[in-house]
Amino acid sequence: MGDAQAAKPVSGADPRNSLYERIGRFLDEHRLSPDPAHYHFAHAVLSAPDQPLAIAVARLTDGGVRLSRNDIERLGGQVVAGDPAAHRPASGQASEVAAETGVDSAISLVVETQHHVEDFTQIMRTMQDETRGFGRDLAKSAAAIKQIAEIDEITQITTMMIGRIHDSEVRLAAATAEADILRTKLVEAHDIARRDMLTGLPNRRAFEEAFAERDLDAGPYCLAVCDIDRFKGVNDLHGHGVGDRVLIAIGQALSSECAPHLVVRHGGEEFALLIKGKTLSDAAKLLDRVRATVAAKRYRNRETDAPLGSITFSAGITAIHIEETSGIAFSRADRLLYTAKEQGRDRICAA
């Protein structure tokens, strides 16, 4: 790709309209509520179109791209908690925000229940083994009693007890089998909670777990953040169904080309990678090969056969320092992604 295009006036900066009206449209376009913090940011952008802030916003929104929360905060703005500032889900992504909200409590419940099932299963197996052993001992005692003396009453009681123990063994075996089935289902539920429903890739929680559990002796590790360029334009021109298929295609390309490294859908049109055992230089080369492969493909709308044009992504990649948190490493990669977008998109920035 060539150098970054010259900045153009911010969308909606028509001198015939009042600043108040333009601020309202800006807030609506970027899904920001009329909060004073949002109004202040929009005013700073629109009241000085030739200043660095407005120029940066123009570059980021080129092609109809909506500002993300990270974009606004990097530019010195503030996004009020709870407002739908960016990456608003659509179509196949519609349940993403709701699912993300409840996933912590759901996973906690799964884990807690799984522990209870494990304990119950162990108790059942212990009881089953002890009952089986007691039954064998009692049967031997009954045989010995018969050999010593023909005491009908004792024999009848003993036989009845052996029968009841056998019935108990059968019921315990059934209960243990049911517990095993439940445990398997809980494992499946735990996996579902760590997987993105649209792309089938692992999700943000799986990424955080993998980052926390990584083997430092198997390093070095690198973290990359990838974002599909001008994705809002795809949704606007071709519909969210096509946008969903683009997300799936890019996710599959990253996953297959970067295997066995972890690729997750981090949210919206953003993917994250945890690359193990490669230097930053080698990891950046790997990711750049994937970028070139994706950029070379030509996608079409399978309903209308209309070409989508070139679909590209930009990425920031950084080496993870020992003992640093995922948040720190991710923020550094995210800033590099922002640089790649500023420099014209369809490129990798590494540091």
Image (spheres, helix red, strand yellow):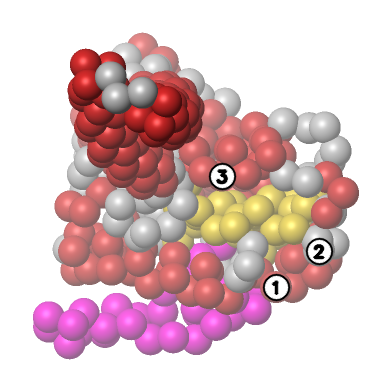
The answer to whether 122 appears left or right of 283 in the picture is: left
- Residue 342 appears in the picture as rendered: no
Q: Name the N-terminal-most of marks 1 and 2.
A: 2
**Helix, strand or loop for disc 2:** loop
Circle number at residue 7: none
Q: Is residue 263 above or below residue 46?
A: below
- Residue at point 67%, 36% (across, down): 212
Instruction: Pick whichever, 102 or 297, lies toward us.
Output: 102
Q: Is residue 212 magenta?
A: no
Instruction: Pick whichever, 258 or 152, lies toward us.
Output: 152
Residue 264 in percent (x, y) is at: 50, 53
Magenta segment: 288-314
The answer to whether 189 appears left or right of 318 in the picture is: left
State the residue position of label 3: 207
Instruction: Pick whichever, 288 or 175, lies toward us.
Output: 175
Instruction: Pick whichever, 151 or 210, lies toward us.
Output: 151
Which is more foreground, mark 3 or mark 1?
3
Residue type, label 3: Phe
State the residue position of label 1: 286
Which is more foreground, mark 1 or mark 2?
2
Cβ–Cβ below 8 Å for labels 1 and 2?
A: yes
State the residue position of label 2: 278
